[in-house]
Image (cartoon, helix red, strand yellow):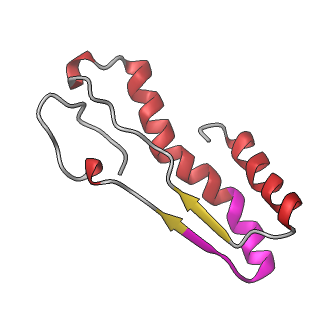
Amino acid sequence: MTVEEAAQAAVQLAVDAFGRLDVLVNNAGYGDTQPFEQVTSEDFRQLVDTCFFGVVNLTRAAIPIMRHQRSGHILHISSTGGRFATPRQCGVSCF
């Protein structure tokens, strides 16, 4: 869901299939287990894009539909990996 157009298409697919959008659950993400200094810039950017822009893109796609319906719920789910560090682990995981 790091591509804005893909997020919009996914939300529209749900609306087309079910006639409305009642719930969006933002749960995509992962943590990188490599030591921080070994994580490539490309891998780090993909991690941040997934954890941050995945939420942004899907939420921005869902809000206009839910406003039009005058109802809907958006749930953001995280893991403790974004709050507690472990030795030899990349300094960032999904929040």
- Say which residue appears at 53% left-offset and 57% top-offset: 26
* Residue 26 appears left or right of 88: right
- Residue sticking out furthest to the bottom: 70
Taking the spot 53% from the left edge, 45% from the top edge, the residue there is 53
Q: How many numbered circles are shown?
A: 0
37 is higher (above) or lower (below) than 61: above
- Nearer-the-camera pick, 70 or 86: 86
* Position of residue 18 in the picture relative to residue 42 (left or right): right
- Percent of width and height locating residue 66: 73, 73
Q: Is residue 73 magenta?
A: yes
Rendered location of residue 50, percent (x, y): 50, 39
Q: Residue furthest front?
A: 18
45 lies left or right of 81: right
Instruction: Look at 29% across and 49% down and name the residue there.
Output: 82
Res. 33 image quadrant: top left
| Quarter location, residue 40 | top left
Q: Residue furthest left?
A: 87
Q: Where is 30 relative to 82, above or below?
A: above
Residue 8 on image: x %, y %: 75, 49
Residue range of the region highlighted in magenta in the rendering: 61-74
Please name whichever residue, 17 or 57, is drawn nearer the observer in this view of the structure: 17
**Image quadrant occupied by the N terminus:** top right
Q: Which x, y percent locates residue 94?
A: 37, 46
The residue positioned 70% from the left and 62% from the top of the image is 62
Q: Main secondary structure of the magenta part?
A: helix
* Left or right of 92 on screen, residue 35: left
